[in-house]
Amino acid sequence: MSEADEIIRLENVYKIFGPQPRGRALKLSKDGMSKNEVQAATDHVVGMTDVSFDVKRGETFVLMGLSGSGKSTAIRTVNKLHDITDGHVYVDGVDVQKLSGTALQEFRRDKMGMVFQHFALFPHRSVIDNAGYGLKVQGLDRKERESKALEALELVGLGPFAQSSPRQLSGGMQQRVGLARALAADPDILLMDEAFSALDPLIRRQMQDEMLAIQEQLQKTILFITHDLNEALRIGDRVCIMKDGAVVQIGTPEEILTQPATGYVAEFVQDVDQGRVIDVETIMNPPVVIRPGETISQVLERLDGQSGAFAIDDVGRPTGLLVPEDGIRAASMGTTDVSSALRIDFESTTGSQKFNDVYASAGRGLLMAVVDEGGKLIGALDPREIMEEMGRVEQLIDGFEREVFM
Ligand SMILES: Nc1ncnc2c1ncn2[C@@H]1O[C@H](COP(=O)(O)OP(=O)(O)OP(=O)(O)O)[C@@H](O)[C@H]1O
Ligand SMILES: [Mg+2]
């Protein structure tokens, strides 16, 4: 990935809270002393220690970790709500630490929008005025403000409430106004700190879905904070897990789930429904395709452990499945013609489907066809492998559990 694709970059960032942040506490933290040890030795709080990550343009990057792990501290370095103690923060090539005064104001205003956990709306202003508030600060005239604010409200499903008072809105709707306000100014970057955490689970899921839909359309860069791994895995392109101010692991949801870097991550992962995250593509096999003129026994010989071979039509779409049992039975009766032993009741799926989506079909035990958007055969999914993969993840977690947690 080239540097041009990165929009946010933290490089070995340290943030120490206390009267002498650059003193002994920083040195000890750099020497690898843990947050608790540094605190005991120096009475300074380690907010972040040696944090590095980069966020790519258009990416949803999630910071995940327990309370106090340094998530908010990290997000606040991006718009310089916090000065950092050591390291570098770059946004779109700009060294954020060097900004001050008007340049800093403009940078915050033009580059990013922020949404917090409890979004404070002005109670006496209409929803549309609240959504357009940032634009007012930018100096847009009323008409322009209203049209942009309305557009943003429509994106979050609040168009009909534009003239309402915030007091008429539920908590979830108020959060949406917060999101609309951030979107109205059309910033490149959205910083979202526990934006959905105060919402009850159902509304929260709805908001996640809507954000995914909005993101598909707008392709913003989103730095999203949550302490909920399910939420992180659901909305993140990549997830960064933090603990005690340090980065523990950065990876795609699948990497986090299937290759947890430490026992700490594995412990989190344990609570997650794996099947919702792992997709078909990661475990499908290259399909065995039946060649024209091949006999049943020739196909069976080529199976090489796979539980079936597919017949395809002239554009590559699967039309039939030969499973070993059928083939052996037919061959034992002297049949050589493959077509007489083909099943057509096989299931098809796409590579991006998640395990959970294919569970019911996998339950039939038949090899499944994996097809692309055009319906062409691109892989074969063995139901046994789904079960194995799930088992493997569980074993991995069991293995970690026996270790001493870091
Ligand atoms: N202004 C501050 N002064 C002193 N210590 C602070 C300050 N802000 C944060 N901290 C400390 O830095 C550490 C990281 O805090 P931070 O708010 O970043 O955690 P978080 O991961 O966002 O947690 P939460 O999930 O509770 O929001 C904590 O130990 C916290 O007490
Ligand atoms: Mg926080």
Image (tube, rainbow, N blue to C red):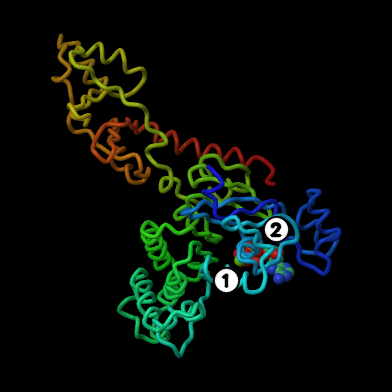
From the viewer's perspective, is 14 left or right of 339? right
Give percent across and percent down for residue 245: 69, 57
**Residue 3, can we see it?**
yes
| 258 or 210: nearer the viewer | 210
Q: Mark 2 points at which residue?
A: 48
- Residue type at mark 1 is Glu
From the viewer's perspective, is 91 left or right of 336? right
Residue beneath the point at 44% across and 69% down: 183
Task: Estimate how packed mark 2 is, as few (under 14), some (14 to 19) or many (20 or more) residues with alpha carbons within 10 Å.
Answer: many
Q: Which residue lies furthest to the bottom in this view?
A: 124
Q: Distance between the residues labelled 2 and 1?
A: 26 Å
Q: Does the residue labelled 1 lie within 8 Å of ligand 1?
A: no
Report the label total.
2
- Residue type at mark 2 is Met
What kind of element bears circle 2? strand
Q: From what the image shows, is residue 322 above or below residue 125?
A: above
Q: From what the image shows, is residue 280 above or below residue 21?
A: above
What kind of element bears circle 1? helix
| 378 or 310: nearer the viewer | 378
Q: Name the residue under label 1.
A: 106
Residue beneath the point at 67% across and 70% down: 100
